[in-house]
Image (cartoon, coloured by chain):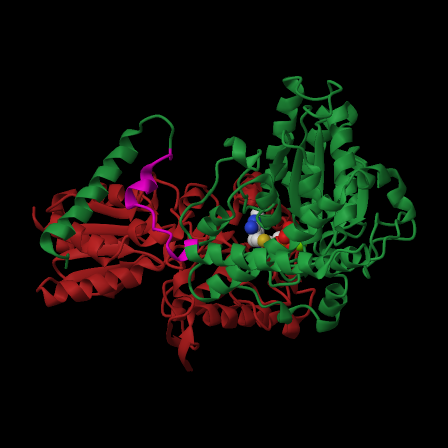
């Protein structure tokens, strides 16, 4: 069945609902997710439908939420946590990186920790400090965590369900600025496994790589470039850890040029990792250095400066011009 | 939920504005008694002005002038009383709703507007003597509790407290909400404060909600008892009674500066408005609850008290005029606030020169200039 015109936030809501229906061990936990339905209303209606023992309005303590979810997972539950905003995940950092990520390894495989941590992230919402960070790199750097991010409603609907089914912990980054734009969702088939990269636009002159909200910026850049006679291929990584490299490498071997864009600061980031891997594996196909277009290595600025901080299609095209000039 | 029969909260003014100190208020009476009629009127004036400011800021947000607003409506009694109780040498660590405290400590509240308009993450300089050690807002729930405690440790190490001089000995006060009490940082602050016997008051504004989550989710025992197991005694006050808030805070701060260590105040109050301008409180609370708290309004109660004590209509007219002027001045200055320069993103990231930041700042400047030259990019 195809549901037309579904916003991404609502697609996650439907995906979570399906996960709750499929498995009585699935629980939702977080601040304001029950009665209020979350500050973005992603869990709206779920407490009313499934009850307060499956959709928990927790005390205000992120370390408490993740730490107790770990205990619940030991008991056979599959907790799905909502962190209210990106910048509020850090009180749980020990529980995520030293505990959740490593407990399967520490138990020598005797126990599994199928916990999903949903984190709304990214800019373009004009919010105050701690609300617009793209902090995926901290989690990408931690072995034992899988990290994914959908860019569109169809993927969001399926990826959240696949994340819940994963027996490993999954950090699920939701691009806040994409919560509202609508698209069709096919509820009969996902089309892609959770960790598959997807080519979202074919092209021959250069490859653009991104994830989350950046994918729509890349598509916009590709549209503009097409009017100027350039053919750009656009790749949505979807899975940030592990990365499904085959489609990326194949594309770069074809185009010989690559620009990687992200909202996060560039230093020691996803873009750095992808650029290094492409350089190692496609060296003889490259016609130009792989360029990164990223947020600056500064704190995310006050809202009035976010449009300058965040890479837009102009900044992407500036980099495209540079890779094409070699 | 507070077991008020066992340890009733400190109250001087009934919700009707009658002066009728509770039994528990006795220990704090001397602090009330030193207030003059001018002080009473000043408390009232500050509450009215900050409420008017809050209304103006709410309107500015609705009109697209602010990214967000965090209303203080309803909590003026707790804030104005406790702020006046602090001495100039004290250090105040707010959360993000303490607009009245900031005003009373001497910041220009337009600085708060600048934060919520999206112009700056900080806003004011706590080291400026005019700001009387009012530190910047902290948006991450509970973090500032530890900062205040560490500051208090430093005051102890410096010998800047407990010398016997109440006019110069320093203390710290940290504000946080009922929801914040669940954060590990706040419990850790209790541990450190007790261990190092910091000259400190933990001021909890229990406004009964943490966004949509009621205080009963955070605490099954009244919050003023939260510190006991840590070795931090607590007092509960009627936070909508500005006199109770003043007298209890003044005494606890004096005790703190006299070597008696940390204590905790739970001020019972209510957030009459939304959590922030992004919130819709009708989704989680009842009109009946809201109405019951409107009936305990801190400003109406003080107005009744002042009228009973003979304040003339001209006084009230004057205060309202002053509040209206204050608000229109804020509006006028808000709409003319300039956006920060892009280059400001790169300043103060580090104190010493940093090559990566400098290179990126130079790149952005050149990139922006290229648009000016070409008359636009793609
Ligand atoms: C660490 C952290 N988690 C979540 C949030 C989101 N948040 C902002 S305010 C708030 C509720 C705070 O309630 P309380 O401490 O009672 O203060 P109040 O807002 O009622 O004054 C929440 C959950 C945050 N700012 N910081
Ligand atoms: Mg509260």
Asked whether, in this view, residue A142 is left or right of residue A205, the answer is: right
**Location of residue A254 (image quadrant):** bottom left
Front residue of this view, candidates A139 and A180: A180
Residue A138 percent location from the top left of the image: 44, 42
Q: Is A75 on the left or on the right of B60, as rendered?
A: right
- Left or right placement of residue B292 versus residue B176 in this view: right
All told, the count of numbered labels is 0
In the image, what residue occupies the spot 42% across and 49% down?
A133
Q: Position of residue B275 (x, y in %)?
A: 60, 60
- Decide: is B36 above or below B155: below
- Residue A59 showing in the rendered view: no
**Residue A56 versus residue B123 in the image, above or below:** below
Rendered shade, chain B: green
Chain identifier for the red-coloured part of the image:
A
| B281 magenta-colored | no
Residue positioned 27% across, 61% down in the render: A217
Of the pair B60 and A19, the residue shown nearer to us: B60
Asked if residue B112 can be seen in this view, the reply is: yes
Which image quadrant is residue B161 in? top right
Q: Nearer the viewer, residue B28 or B368?
A: B28
**Which region shows up in magenta?**
B333-349
In which quadrant is the N terminus of chain A drawn?
Answer: bottom left
Residue B86 placed where, x, y %? 68, 36
In the displayed structure, B275 sits above or below A96; it is below
Image point (50%, 54%), residue name:
A85
Residue shown at 78% from the left, 30% from the top: B255
Q: In which quarter of the view is residue B32 placed?
A: top right
Residue B327 placed where, x, y %?
Answer: 52, 57
């Amino acid at each position: 069945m195809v549901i037309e015109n579904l916003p991404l936030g609502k697609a996650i809501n439907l995906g979570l609902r399906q996960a709750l229906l499929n498995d009585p061990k699935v629980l939702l936990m977080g601040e304001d997710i029950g009665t209020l339905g979350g500050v973005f209303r992603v869990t709206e209606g779920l407490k009313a439908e499934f009850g307060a023992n499956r959709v928990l309005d927790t005390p205000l303590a992120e370390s408490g939420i993740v730490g107790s979810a770990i205990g619940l997972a030991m008991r056979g539950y599959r907790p799905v946590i909502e962190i209210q905003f990106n910048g509020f995940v850090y009180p749980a950092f020990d529980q995520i990186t030293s505990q959740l990520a490593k407990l399967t390894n520490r138990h020598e495989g005797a126990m599994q920790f199928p916990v999903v941590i949903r984190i709304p992230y990214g800019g373009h919402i004009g919010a105050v400090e701690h609300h617009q960070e793209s902090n995926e790199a901290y989690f990408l750097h931690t072995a034992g965590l899988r990290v994914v991010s959908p860019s569109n409603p169809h993927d969001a609907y399926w990826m959240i369900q696949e994340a819940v089914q994963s027996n490993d912990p999954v950090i699920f980054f939701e691009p806040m600025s994409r919560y509202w734009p609508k698209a069709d969702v096919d509820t009969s088939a996902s089309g892609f496994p959770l960790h598959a990269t997807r080519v979202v636009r074919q092209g021959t002159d250069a490859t653009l790589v991104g994830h989350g909200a950046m994918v729509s910026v890349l598509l916009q850049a590709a549209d503009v470039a097409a009017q100027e006679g350039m053919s750009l291929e656009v790749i949505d990584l979807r899975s940030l850890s592990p990365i499904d490299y085959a489609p990326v490498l194949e594309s770069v071997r074809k185009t010989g040029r690559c620009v990687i864009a992200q909202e996060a600061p560039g230093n020691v980031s996803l873009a750095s990792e992808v650029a290094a891997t492409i350089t190692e594996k496609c060296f003889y196909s490259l016609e130009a250095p792989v360029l990164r277009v990223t947020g600056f290595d500064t704190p995310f600025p006050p809202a009035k400066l976010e449009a300058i901080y965040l890479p837009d299609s102009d900044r992407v095209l500036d980099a495209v011009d540079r890779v094409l000039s070699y | 939920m507070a077991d008020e029969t066992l340890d009733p909260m400190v109250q001087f003014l009934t919700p009707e504005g009658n002066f009728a100190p509770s039994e528990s208020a006795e220990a704090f009476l001397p602090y009330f008694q030193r207030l003059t009629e001018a002080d009473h009127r000043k408390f009232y004036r500050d509450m009215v002005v900050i409420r008017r400011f809050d209304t103006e800021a709410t309107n500015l947000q609705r009109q697209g002038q602010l990214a967000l607003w965090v209303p203080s409506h309803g909590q003026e009694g707790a804030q104005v009383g406790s702020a006046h109780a602090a001495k100039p040498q004290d250090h105040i660590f707010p959360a993000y709703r303490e607009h009245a405290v900031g005003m009373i400590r001497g910041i220009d509240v337009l600085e708060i507007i600048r934060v919520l308009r999206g112009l700056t993450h900080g806003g004011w300089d706590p080291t400026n003597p005019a700001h009387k050690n009012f530190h910047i807002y902290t948006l991450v729930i509970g973090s500032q509790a530890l900062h205040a405690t560490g500051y208090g440790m430093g005051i102890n190490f410096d010998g800047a407290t407990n010398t016997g001089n109440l006019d110069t000995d320093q203390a710290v006060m940290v504000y946080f909400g009922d929801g914040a009490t669940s954060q590990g940082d706040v419990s850790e602050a209790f541990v450190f404060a007790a261990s190092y016997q910091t000259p400190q008051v933990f001021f909890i504004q229990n406004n009964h909600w943490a966004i949509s989550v009621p205080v009963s989710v955070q605490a099954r025992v009244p919050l003023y008892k939260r510190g006991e197991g840590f070795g931090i005694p607590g007092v509960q006050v009627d936070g909508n009674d500005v006199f109770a808030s003043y007298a209890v805070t003044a005494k606890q701060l004096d005790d703190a500066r006299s070597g008696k260590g940390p204590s905790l105040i739970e001020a019972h109050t209510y957030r009459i408005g939304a959590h922030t301008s992004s919130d819709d409180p009708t989704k989680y609370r009842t009109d009946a609850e809201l109405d019951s708290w409107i009936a305990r309004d801190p400003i109406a109660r003080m107005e009744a008290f002042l009228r009973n004590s003979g304040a003339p209509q001209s006084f009230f007219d004057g205060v309202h005029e002053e509040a209206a002027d204050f608000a229109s001045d804020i509006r006028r200055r808000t709409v003319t606030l300039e956006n920060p320069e892009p280059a400001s993103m790169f300043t103060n990231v580090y104190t010493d020169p940093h090559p990566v930041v400098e290179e990126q700042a130079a790149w952005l400047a050149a990139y922006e200039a290229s648009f000016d030259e070409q008359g636009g990019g793609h």
